[in-house]
Image (spheres, rainbow, N blue to C red):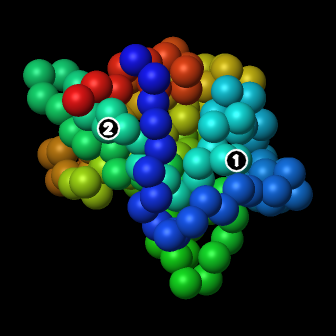
Amino acid sequence: MTVHWRHRIWKATRPATSEEVAALEEELSVTLPDDYKRVAVLHQGMAPDPCVLDIGTGNTVICELLTISKDPEFRAYSMAHACEHFKPHLPAGVYPFASTGAGDLICFDYREAAHAPKVIFYFTEEAGKGALHPVADSFTDFLSMLHD
C-alpha cells in the first residue's frame, strides 16, 4: 500500500533543508536512516494516510512525523524537542520521530545498530513509567505496516 501525506502541523509543505538535517544529526549524535530522510525531508510535520499501526493486540494512529526543522511556534512537534523532553524517560540510543493520537511515540532504536536503527513504540503510560515495544526492522518496514 502506498503512503500518502496530508498537512498536519503547517498548512503548506515545508521541506527540510540538508543543513537542518545535518544540524539535527549533529545535535543527536546519530546518522538518521536514509529511507527516513528521503521521506521526512519532504513530509516533516505531515500525517501519513493510511495512519493505523497495529501494536500487540491493539492499534494506534500515527498523527505526524515530527519536524526536522525548528519552528518556535511549533516547537512541541520537533524531533529535537521530543528527544530533549523524553530524554529522562527513554533509554540512551532511542529517539522519537513520530507521535500518536494518544501522546505515545514512534522511535528509532540505535541501541543494537548505530547505522540501522529498528523502529519501536514508546507507550508513555504503561506501568506508570513507559514501555518499549518492537515495531519494525526499518523505517521502510514501519511505513509498510500502516493501514486503514
- Give the quarter of the figure containing the C terminus: top left
Q: Residues within 10 Å of mark 2 (few under 14, many from 20)?
A: many
Question: Sequence order check: which comes first, mark 2 or mark 1?
Answer: 1
Tell me the distance, in whole angstroms, between the alpha carbons under discs 2 and 1. Answer: 19 Å
Q: Which is more toward the observer, 12 or 138?
A: 12
Near-viewer residue (19 or 96): 19
**Kind of residue at badge 2:** Cys
User: Along the horizontal axis of the image, is 108 left or right of 90?
Assistant: right
* Quadrant into which the N terminus falls: top left
Residue at far left of view: 57
Residue drawn at (26%, 42%) of the image: 61
Residue 41, numbered circle: 1
User: As drawn, is 61 to the left or to the right of 14?
Assistant: left
Tell me the quarter of the picture where residue 112 sits.
Answer: top right
Tell me what residue is drawn at x 67 percent, y 71 percent.
70
Cβ–Cβ under 8 Å for marks 2 and 1: no
Tag of residue 51: 2
Q: Is residue 47 visible?
A: yes
- Give the structural element (helix, strand or loop) at label 2: loop
Residue 88 to residue 70: above or below: above
Q: Is residue 27 left or right of residue 107?
A: right
Identify which residue is drawn at 42% across, 61% down: 8
Disc 1 element: helix
Query: Is 42 or 124 nearer to us in this picture?
Result: 42
User: How far from the left and from the top, in percent, is residue 12?
Assistant: 57, 66
Q: Amino acid at mark 1?
A: Val
Residue 120, given in percent of the width and then of the height, sits at: 42, 30
Residue appearing at x 54%, y 40% in the figure? 94
Q: Tell me the crowding category of disc 1: few under 14, some 14 to 19, or many 20 or more residues within 10 angstroms, Cα based.
A: some
Is 32 rendered above or below residue 125? above
Rendering coords of residue 122 (x, y %): 35, 42
